[in-house]
Amino acid sequence: MATPLKRAVSLAAGWLADRKLPTPLRAPIYSAYARLTGARLDEVRPPLAGYPSLGAFFVRRLVDGARPIDQDPAHIVAPVDGTVQSLDPIEQGTVLQAKGRAYAVRDLLAGVGEDVELEGGFAWTIYLGPRDYHRIHAPEACRIVAARWVPGARHSVNPRVLARRPVLAINERCVLRLETGRGPLLFVLVGAVIVGRIRVVGLEPGADGALETPLERGRGEELARFEMGSTIVLLAPPGYARPLPALAPGQPIRLGAPIGRAP
C-alpha cells in the first residue's frame, strides 16, 4: 500500500494541480512548463488560457488531426504517447520489467482475465513522461467488459526506478479487460508517485468486476486518462499480435502508430 508520506505527497500535488490560476498567468505558466519538459504547445487545442489549472493542462486535448490512427486491421496501435519501456514475451507466467527484473503477470492483473491463457503471448510497456499527452485511447475497436481498481503503492515509474524495484505489480492501478474481434486484450493503467487519479471514460472509479453494460470503443477512441504521467502495460494472448520488428525499448511512440501485428 502507499505509505502515509507518499499518499500525503500525492494528495498535496493533486490539490496544487487543481488550483485555479489567474487567467493572465495561464499561458506563461504552461509555456514555461513546455520549455522545461519538452511538451509541444503547437499540438494543444487552444486557447491555452482556457485550461484553468495545471491539472487541466496535464489532460489537455490535442488539435484535430494531431494523432492519425493507423487503420490496418492487422495492427494494434499505440494507445498513448510515450516511450517504449519494454517488449516482452510472456514466459513462465512472468514479464520482464527492466534490466532482467521479472514480475508475475497474474499479480499485475489482480484477478482480471484469469480465464485468458497468456503463456506465449506478448506484453508492451509504455512510459508516459511529463511532456506526453496524458489521455489513453483504444488500441483497436473493443468493448470494455471488466475493470478493477487495485490499491497499492505509489512508487515512481521512471525507468531508472524500475531497474531497482518491481514497481508495476505493486503500484496502484486500474486493470481493464477489452474484448475485440480477435479475442481479449488485458490493459493495465499503472499509477505513480503523484498519480492518484486514473479515470476511465464512462466508469466510476472503484468499479470491480464484470460490467453489466460493456463500454464500446472504436479504434483510437478515448478510453481513459492519467492525471499526470505514468505507465501502461498491454498484454495479448498467444497468436493475437507480436511487436513490430522496428519497435525497440527506448523508442518514443505516438498515439495511433502501429505497435503490433497479427502473426
Image (tube, rainbow, N blue to C red):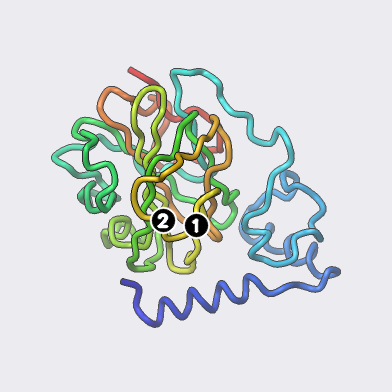
Amino acid on which the number 1 mark rests in the picture: Glu
The residue lying at 42 percent from left, 60 percent from top is 206
Number of residues whose C-alpha sits closer than 10 Å to that of mark 2, classed few (under 14), some (14–19) or many (20 or more):
some
Question: Badge 2 is on which residue?
Answer: 207
Quarter holding the N terminus is bottom left
**Residue placed at 80% from the left, 59% from the top?**
50
Secondary structure of the residue carrying tag 2 is loop
Q: Percent x, y for residue 42? A: 75, 45
Q: Which residue ends up furthest to the left in the rendered image?
A: 92
Q: Which mark is residue 249?
A: none
What amino acid is at disc 2? Ala
The image quadrant where one finds the C terminus is: top left
Residue on which the image places disc 1: 204
Direction from residue 195 to residue 90 in the image, left or right: left
**Residue 235 drawn at (x, y percent):** 33, 38
Q: Residue at x 35, y 40 (%)?
A: 186
The reply to whether residue 167 is in sight is yes
Give the CA distance from mark 2 to mark 1.
6 Å
